[in-house]
Image: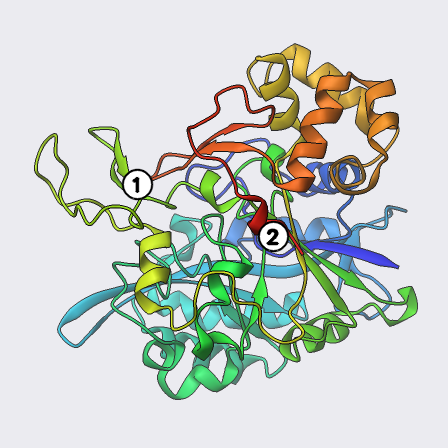
C-alpha cells in the first residue's frame, strides 16, 4: 500500500501557529490530502502531550497512534521539534532538530530530562540550552529506538548547514553523536538535485516534510512509502529511512525550492534579492547592509559535484504546489478565498489532494474544474512554470500558467525524476 507521511508539523502551542490546530482537525486534513502518517508535533509541550494522551491510543502495538474510537486510517507518530542553542568555538550555534519516539511513555520520559535545559511550556518548539550532541545523547539514553534528524538543514538561521550555522558537516555539528544521524530534512528552499551535489552527505537519507503552522500547509512536502499494511509500523518506517531503502521509501514530495523563502540571497527590508549564480554582490545596494546568504548560495559553496549530478540509485522525487495555491494562481484570487475553497472542495470530494496533484488524468481534472486548472497542474508536473524566487524570509511568487515569462523559469533539464 502507498503510505504518504509528514513527520514535521506543529500544534497550536508553537509560536506563530494557527489556534485551530487540534488532533481531530489534523486527522481530517490528512484524510483530505491523502496522508497516512503524521507527526504529532510538539510532544515536549505539557498541554499538547496531555491532549495526545487523552485523544490518541496506540494502534495494534505498531508504535503508531490513532484517534480513540476512530475508523480512520490516519496514524500519528509521536514527534517534536526542539531548538538547541549552544556555544562552540566561541560562537553561538543554533540547530533545530526533529525527534520521533515509538511511544508516549518514552516521550514523557524525555520531557522529564529536557525540562532542566529550558522551559518546555514556553513554546511548542522549545529552546534548549544544550548542544546538539548533548541532545542526541540524551534522547538515546532515554529511548534506544528514537529517531533524530536535523530539521530544514539549509535554513540560514537554524539549519545544521545554514549560512549562519558555522557547520560544514554533520560530524562537526553532532560530533560523536553523528553515529545516530541517518537523515536530514531538505527544507522548502532546497531539493534533491541541489543536495546530490555534496558527496559527503550521500550517507544521509533526504526527507521532505511540511513544517506546517496551519492545517492548510499540511503535506506541502512529504514522503511516499510502499509497504504492506500488516508490516506498517514505527520500526519498519524508521528502518527504511535509516537504510535509505528505495524499495520502501519510494519517493519524496518536495516544494519547488525557488518558492521557498530562503532560496536566493537578499535583504527583506529593502525587498532586494539576487541570484548568487550570476552576481557576487554581498551587500544590499539600497541600504548597504549585508545580504542574507540563501540556500542556493550556501549549497554552491559546499558542492563538490556539478549541477545536474545524479548519484547511483537515488530516491526519486516529485515537486508540487499545494492545490489551493494552484487554484488561487489560476483564478487570481486569494488562497483562502471562498472561490478557491469551493473549487478545492469540489475536487477533494472526488479525490485526495495528492491524487489530484500527482496521479489524476488531466482531462478528468478539467471536467471537474476548468481546463486552466488542469493545464496549471500539467505544467507543475512537468516543471514548466515560472517562479520569482524567494529570499530572506519572503516566499517566492509562482506563475503556473507562465503569464509573466522572463521572471524565472524552471528549466526543463530540472524535471523531476
Q: Image check: 167 left or right of 2?
A: left
- Mark 2 packing: few (<14 Cα in 10 Å), some, or many (20+)? few
Name the residue at 62% across, 69% down. Answer: 101
Name the residue at 27% across, 36% down. Answer: 273
Specify whether residue 128 is in view: no
How far across and how far down the image is residue 89, in percent? 16, 77
Tell me how far mark 2 sits from mark 1, CA to CA.
Answer: 36 Å
Image: 91 above or below 266: below
How far across and how far down the image is residue 325, in percent? 60, 27
- The numbered mark at residue 392 is 1
Q: Which quarter of the picture shows residue 93?
A: bottom left
Q: Nearer the viewer, residue 255 or 44?
A: 255
How far across and how far down the image is residue 8, in percent? 57, 54
Helix, strand or loop for disc 1: loop
How far across and how far down the image is residue 18, in percent? 52, 33
Name the residue at 67% across, 71% down. Answer: 102
Specify whether residue 416 is in view: yes
- Mark 1 packing: few (<14 Cα in 10 Å), some, or many (20+)? many
Name the residue at 79% across, 54% down. Answer: 66
Q: Nearer the viewer, residue 292 or 412?
A: 412
Amino acid at each position: 500500500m502507498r503510505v504518504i507521511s509528514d513527520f514535521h508539523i506543529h500544534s497550536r502551542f508553537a509560536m506563530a501557529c494557527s489556534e485551530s490546530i487540534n488532533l481531530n482537525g489534523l486527522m481530517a486534513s490528512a484524510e483530505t490530502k491523502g496522508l497516512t502518517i503524521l507527526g504529532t508535533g510538539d510532544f515536549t509541550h505539557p498541554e499538547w502531550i496531555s491532549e495526545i494522551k487523552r485523544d490518541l491510543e496506540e494502534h495494534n502495538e505498531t508504535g503508531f497512534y490513532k484517534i480513540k474510537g476512530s475508523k480512520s486510517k490516519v496514524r500519528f507518530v509521536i514527534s517534536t521539534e526542539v531548538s538547541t542553542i549552544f556555544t562552540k568555538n566561541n560562537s553561538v550555534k543554533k540547530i533545530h532538530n526533529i525527534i520521533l519516539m515509538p511511544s508516549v511513555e518514552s516521550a514523557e520520559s524525555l520531557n522529564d530530562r529536557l525540562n532542566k535545559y529550558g522551559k518546555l511550556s514556553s513554546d511548542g518548539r522549545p529552546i534548549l540550552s544544550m548542544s546538539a550532541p548533548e541532545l542526541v545523547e540524551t534522547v538515546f539514553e532515554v529511548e534506544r529506538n528514537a529517531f533524530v534528524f536535523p530539521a530544514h538543514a539549509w535554513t540560514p538561521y537554524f539549519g545544521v548547514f545554514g549560512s549562519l550555522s558555522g557547520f560544514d558537516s554533520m560530524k562537526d555539528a553532532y560530533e560523536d553523536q553523528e553515529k545516530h544521524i541517518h537523515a536530514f530534512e531538505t527544507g522548502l528552499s532546497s531539493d534533491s538535485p541541489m543536495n546530490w551535489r555534496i558527496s559527503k552527505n550521500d550517507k544521509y537519507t533526504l526527507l521532505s516534510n511540511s513544517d506546517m503552522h496551519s492545517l492548510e500547509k499540511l503535506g506541502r512536502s512529504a514522503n511516499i512509502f510502499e509497504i504492506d499494511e500488516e508490516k506498517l509500523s514505527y520500526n519498519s518506517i524508521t528502518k527504511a529511512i535509516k537504510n535509505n531503502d528505495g524499495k520502501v521509501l519510494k519517493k519524496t514530495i518536495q516544494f519547488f525550492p525557488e518558492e521557498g523563502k530562503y532560496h536566493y540571497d537578499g535583504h527583506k527590508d529593502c525587498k532586494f534579492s539576487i541570484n548568487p549564480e550570476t552576481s557576487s554582490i554581498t551587500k544590499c545596494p539600497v541600504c548597504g547592509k549585508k545580504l542574507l546568504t540563501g540556500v542556493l548560495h550556501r549549497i554552491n559553496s559546499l558542492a563538490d559535484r556539478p549541477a545536474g549530478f545524479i548519484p547511483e540509485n537515488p530516491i526519486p522525487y516529485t515537486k508540487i504546489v499545494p492545490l489551493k495555491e494552484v487554484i488561487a494562481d489560476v483564478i487570481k484570487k486569494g488562497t483562502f478565498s471562498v472561490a478557491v475553497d469551493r473549487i478545492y472542495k469540489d475536487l477533494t470530494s472526488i479525490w485526495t489532494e495528492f491524487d489530484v496533484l500527482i496521479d489524476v488524468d488531466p482531462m478528468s481534472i478539467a471536467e471537474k474544474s476548468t481546463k486552466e486548472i488542469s493545464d496549471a497542474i500539467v505544467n507543475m508536473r512537468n516543471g514548466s512554470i515560472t517562479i520569482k524566487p524567494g529570499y530572506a524570509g519572503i516566499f517566492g511568487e509562482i506563475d503556473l500558467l507562465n503569464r509573466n515569462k522572463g521572471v524565472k523559469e524552471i528549466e526543463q533539464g530540472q524535471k523531476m525524476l
